[in-house]
Amino acid sequence: GPYMEGRTVAVYGVAAACMVVPIIFPDALWPIFIAFLVLEVTVGTFYAVSSSLRSKYLPGDLQASIMNIFRLPLNMFVVLGTKMTDWYEPRIVFFTVSAWFLMAAALQWLMTVSKAADAKKQD
């Protein structure tokens, strides 16, 4: 079933919520610190879940090539997010990163719904 896909939606959602904490509590050290710790947990969880999804959806002999194609756009997001700290105030940067996580959650959710519908059609 779509267990791993659903877990990825949750991981992205929690990551987005973590990025909102510095916007809501800009001067509160402990809530921000805890949010960043939780964010790090979501990153670690993402790597475990994404490896399962890669093995499920990508042919083994093509995994490295396909993942390398997506490495450049991903790194562009990282550079852009980092560079934004020079251009905008922190709350705008955190909001933008949170929005990116929400977009990822929405896209993953769409994939999950699509796969579940395909599975029902085949039954």
Image (cartoon, grey):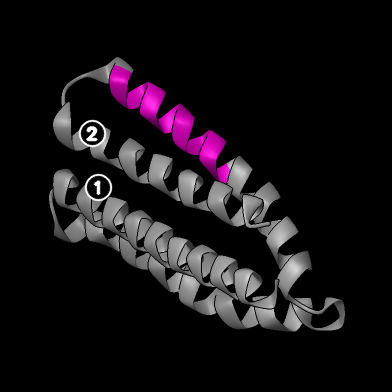
Which quarter of the figure is the C terminus placed in?
bottom right
Residue at the (31%, 16%) spot, across then down:
30
Q: Can you give x and y, in whole percent of width and height, for residue 108 in the image?
A: 48, 63
Report the residue at 38% width, 62% height from top: 106
Q: Indicate the amino acid at tag 2.
A: Pro
Q: Residue at 16% across / 44% down in the picture?
A: 91
Mark 2 = which residue?
Answer: 22
Q: Which residues are magenta?
A: 31-43
Q: Secondary structure at mark 1?
A: helix
Q: Residues within 10 Å of mark 1 (few under 14, many from 20)?
A: many
Mark 1 in CB contact with mark 2 (< 8 angstroms): yes
Residue 110 in picture, x, y percent from top left = 44, 68
In the image, is residue 12 part of the stretch drawn in magenta? no
- Residue at 72% of width from left, 73% of height from top? 57
Residue farthest along the top direction in this orientation: 30
Label 2: how many Cα within 10 Å (few below 14, some 14–19, many 20+): many
Quarter occupied by the N terminus: bottom right
Q: Horizontal placement of 9 versus 94: left or right?
A: right
**Numbered badge on residue 94:** 1
